[in-house]
Image (cartoon, grey):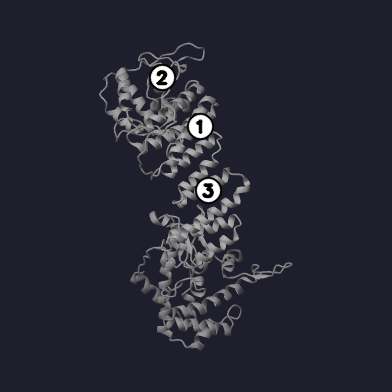
Amino acid sequence: MLLAAQSSPVEGVSGARAEPGRRKSVGPVRSCADTGDDGSEGPMPQVEPSVLGALMEAAKDTVSYEAIAVVLAAADIDTTTAAAQQRDALLAALRLRLPGTGKAQGSTGTLPGGPLKRRSVSLAEVTADQLEIWSAYADAVSTPFVRGRLHHLLLAAGHGRKPDHARGAAAGYLDAAPLLLSALKRFPGLVRATECLRWAGDLAWAFNQKDLQKRVTEDLVALVERVLADTEDHPGIADCLLEGLRVQRYDITDFAERAARRYAGDVHAHVGFLKLLREVAPASRRADIDTAIVDALLDAADADVNAGFRRHNLLTWAATEARDWGLSELRVRAEMALQQTDPDSLGWTRLSRVLIPPRGLSAGARAHIDAAVDLRDALWRTAQDVHPAMREHADDAHVLEGLLRIPRTRINTAGPVQVTPPVDADDNHVVALQVLAMDFLGHLTADQLDRIQERFVPDEAELITALAHDTVLPEPRARTFAHAFRYFWLGEFDAAACIALPQVEQILRQLLRPRVPIVSVAQGKTPGTVDQLGGLIRSMPAAGYPADWSRALELLLVDPDRGMNLRNNVCHGHRTPAPFTQPAP
């Protein structure tokens, strides 16, 4: 948000200058648009004195087209049909947004008629009669702020001779700028004056109006000087003005350097102007500017070690810039600082809740174990099917909206990695549903394992016999796997996970070995490799295994951005040490 400040009008910005031959009288007004293709004169609107007077009065000391529209809409004018039509046409002109204003990308706005009767309108919907009214008032109105808008709209609508309207719009905006700068509401006036100068510059450049280009450049330079000398003006104004000067092919190197120094206390503005300087400065200076940018980010991060996420973000930014520009020493400095980041220092609040499945689900899961004929059958029953939410076309894929749709950024405090998934990545509410489904399934599986222990009370030998498989789990490995189950029943969940997960990886490797390549041979100095757990999981569909299982295992074990990341968090120590209480499917 731009902040208001007090200052006198800029010296050097051109005063209001009327175009030669501009009509000031009220009455029938003819323009180029009023003639047919053969030069014959067409019907022309008669400017209504009451409407023109109301428009001029509404435009006094105003820095907003909407403010003018509000006053004009409430003005007491003649009740004739012509007056009403002309006021409606002018209100539409004031409320349409031209390209480059705010977030609008086209000429859109609202038609007048009361808050409940307004509807969206584009410039293409404006009638020929309204265009004729704009043309008449563009020559009749003496307020340059409004005159520039009307000519600009006529140019955008393709009504009349384009060079004439381009010149009328640019001259109107140039004449409006000093008036806006002297407005009572200083800062809104500064913002609108900057916008008018940018519009004037674009139009003068596009239509090769040399004299207007000179005026634009002089006025932009004068306003930049004022803004950089002010102690309160927002850097966004200076940035917009410098971009306007670039359009006019003006050398802004000195201004960019001064702006970088002027806003050194705001690291984002400071870096922004340094990057602008990098674009316009000679190539011989770029290495020094790159270093200055990274130094500024690192210094800002070091200035307040308790800045939490802001500090982490600055360090990540510095590490990225240093990497891209080959500044190895500064990159190491940023990475070392990142590695010292304590997750608790980020200033975030962790929210958690206890997930309790409905009693009916738990009872059903345990009854499923009670139906097993022996221990081996009971163990198999815990892994019959992955939850339906894993399936690619789940019926409930679009049930949740709101917060779960917000893109998320992962912070890896073990290193300088801050990952934002691509816009088209499936890091969304569908994934959140799948993880939630696994959470439920994990609790149900834990209930089933507890029921197995209650019903069979298996010893180590019985577990080994039930788990052993000649191909994927020979007896020595089955013995290790059995230890994981015994730790689980003792409540030692971390120990159970650390023992079981390597066995899961080995089982998966043995299952895939006959079906897909999992080993790459050495080539020259490049050593051979063996796929690890993540690669193995992603190879499952190619080996003929259901994509549902591949998806579930990926989210459960190895996905650091969206899933539970069980293998990395527990076995690789990526999470803060604490009792592991979340059961795994």
Indicate the quadrant where residue 524 lies. Answer: bottom right
Query: Residue at label 2?
Result: 139
Give the x, y percent position of residue 240. 47, 40
Q: CA distance from mark 3 to mark 1?
A: 22 Å
The quadrant where residue 81 appears? top left
Task: Depth check: give the residue in front, 109 or 286.
Answer: 286
Specify whether residue 11 is in view. Answer: yes
Task: Look at the numbered disc 1 and give the secondary structure of its residue.
Answer: helix
Where does the image place residue 341, in percent across and percent down from the top left? 47, 66
Residue ID at (56%, 50%): 289
Q: Nearer the viewer, residue 436 or 441?
A: 436
Q: Quadrant of the N terminus?
A: top left
Q: Which mark is residue 217?
A: 1
Of 139 and 333, nearer the camera is 333
Q: Earlier in the sequence, mark 3 or mark 1?
A: 1
Amino acid type at circle 2 is Asp
Is 65 rendered above or below residue 131?
A: below
- Looking at the rendered image, the disc whose residue lies closer to the viewer, 3 or 2, is 3
Up the image or down, 537 lies above or below 423; here it is below
Disc 2 or disc 1, which is closer to the eye? 1
User: Which secondary structure, mark 3?
Assistant: helix
The mark found on residue 274 in the picture is 3
